[in-house]
């Protein structure tokens, strides 16, 4: 079962990822843009396009939610303990990182489930 240590390890394994303390909790950034936070025990928050959030939450409410104070943001919370495995956690973290990373850096890193292009 994934936990906060797994979230941190995966986030910091990504190119140019750094951890900073903001709002009294760990936050993770790439090129100065935040892509993940650990706001409270038992959850993490990632970037998620607002147009995708409602469907994501409706389809898997045991995994994902948005607190009322974040309703107008492009973030979603997740419960690592409710995720299927480390692969699902990694896909979620990488997707958020790719949304924050500069295009050339994101393009050089393979999307979840795909190998880097050898050319």
Image (cartoon, rainbow, N blue to C red):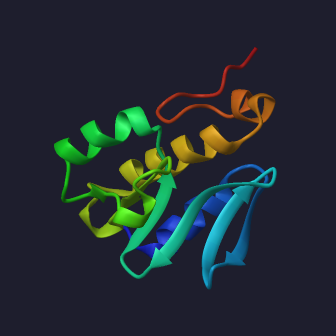
Tell me the residue at 62%/76% (across/down).
26
Number of numbered discs: 0
Q: Is 54 situated above or below 4? A: above
> Residue 74, how many percent across, how many down?
50, 46
Quadrant hosting residue 50: top left
> Residue 30, how many percent across, how many down?
74, 52
In the image shown, does 47 or 109 lie closer to the viewer? 47
> Residue 40, how many percent across, how many down?
44, 80
Tell me the residue at 68%/77% (across/down).
22
Quadrant hosting residue 8: bottom right
Tell me the residue at 37%/35% (across/down).
52
Q: In this view of the protein, can residue 1 be seen by the observer?
A: no
> Residue 109, how many percent across, how many down?
68, 34
In the image shown, does 21 or 112 lie closer to the viewer? 21
| In the displayed structure image, the side of residue 22 where residue 48 appears, left or right | left
Is the N terminus in the top left, top right, bottom left or bottom right quadrant? bottom left
Is the C terminus in the top left, top right, bottom left or bottom right quadrant? top right
| In the displayed structure image, the side of residue 84 where residue 86 appears, left or right | right
Farthest top residue in view: 119
Quadrant hosting residue 82: bottom left
Farthest bottom residue in view: 24
Q: Is 71 situated above or below 118? A: below
Q: In this view of the protein, can residue 8 be seen by the observer?
A: yes
Tell me the residue at 75%/29% (across/down).
103
In the image shown, does 6 or 61 lie closer to the viewer? 61
């Amino acid at each position: 079962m994934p936990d906060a240590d797994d979230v941190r390890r995966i986030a910091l394994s990504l190119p140019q990822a750094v951890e900073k303390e903001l709002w009294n909790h760990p936050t993770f950034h790439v090129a100065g843009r935040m892509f993940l936070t650990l706001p409270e025990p038992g959850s993490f928050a990632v970037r998620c396009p607002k147009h995708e959030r409602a469907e994501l939450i409706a389809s898997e409410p045991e995994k994902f939610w948005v607190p009322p104070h974040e309703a107008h943001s492009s973030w979603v919370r997740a419960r690592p303990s409710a995720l299927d495995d480390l692969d699902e956690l990694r896909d979620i973290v990488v997707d958020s990182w790719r949304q924050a990373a500069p295009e050339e850096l994101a393009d050089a890193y393979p999307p979840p489930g795909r190998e880097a292009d050898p050319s």
